[in-house]
Each structure stands twice: as structure tokens, then as C-alpha cells.
Amino acid sequence: MFILLVEDDPDVSAITVMALHLDPHLTVTSMSTGADALRHLQNSPKPDLILTDNNLPDMEGVALVKAVMASTSEAPPVAFFTASVRSSDIARYKAAGAIGTIAKPFDPMGLAAQVRALLLSTWG
């Protein structure tokens, strides 16, 4: 399963990639901005999941989700990976089309299982 991670903090990104690679069935590509992620999506195979922070340097994750959803009829599922997890935040993410939210700080040992659970929820 291919995960596109959109995270601007290099330390969080590195830990996240290492944590997801604990599952041999997950591959991860990391982007640091929404614009980089959108360019990547135009030129690369569709990921099974986009995992994005909401607080990106060039756009909100919500704007990224909306741009992804508008760019194709078969948009990949998107989940938020963020410290902004108030109920109003989660409602905004869901309204934008996100399938779920993983809160930061996170447990690196359990992250792959959380991602798999999100993917399973989309596949029914």
C-alpha cells in the first residue's frame, strides 16, 4: 500500500516514515508542502492514502483535500495527521472529505495499524 505523507516538519516526517515502514506492506513518499503533493499526484501513481497535516506552510490541509477531490473523479482517500483535533477541527476535515484523523503526538509503534484501520474503513 502506497501512502503519500504531506508533513512540513522534517523531524515528524522522518519519524512518521520510519514508523510506517515498520509494516513491510506500506511504502511512503513524503512531501513538505501542499503544492509539492499536488504536483506529485499529477505525475505519479495514485496513492492508496494521503496522510496530511492541516498546518502546511503554503496551504491548509483542508484546502489540499479540496484541491485533490476537485482534480480527479477517483481521488485517493485522505486522512489528517495533525495536532489540531478539536471537535470543530475534525468536523471541518470530515466536511472536506477526509476519512479520518490521526492525532499528534502519535505512537510510532501503533501508527501503521492506525493507517491500516483507516484504509480498511474505506474498502469496507
Image (cartoon, rainbow, N blue to C red):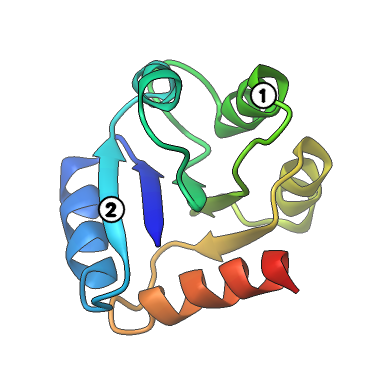
Left/right of residue 51 with respect to residue 78 in the rendered view: left
Residue identifier under label 1? 72
Against 8, is 88 above or below?
Answer: below
Q: Which mark is residue 61?
A: none
Q: Position of residue 57 (x, y in %)?
A: 38, 21
Q: Position of residue 68 (x, y in %)?
A: 61, 26
Nearer mark to the viewer, of 2 and 1: 1
Work out which residue is located at the far front of the displayed protein and give it. 45
Residue sitting at x 31%, y 73%? 25
Disc 2 element:
strand
**Viewer-side residue, 35 vs 88:** 35
Disc 1 element:
loop
Residue sitting at x 28%, y 68%? 20
Residue sitting at x 57%, y 26%? 64
Q: Position of residue 6 (x, y in %)?
A: 38, 39
Residue identifier under label 2? 28
* Label located before the other in sequence (2 or 1): 2
Q: Residues within 10 Å of mark 2 (few under 14, many from 20)?
A: some
**Viewer-side residue, 41 vs 66:** 41
Quarter of the image with the C terminus in it: bottom right
Which amino acid type is marked by label 1? Thr
Which amino acid type is marked by label 2? Val
Quarter of the image with the N terminus in it: bottom left
Res. 47 image quadrant: top left
Q: Position of residue 111 (x, y in %)?
A: 38, 74
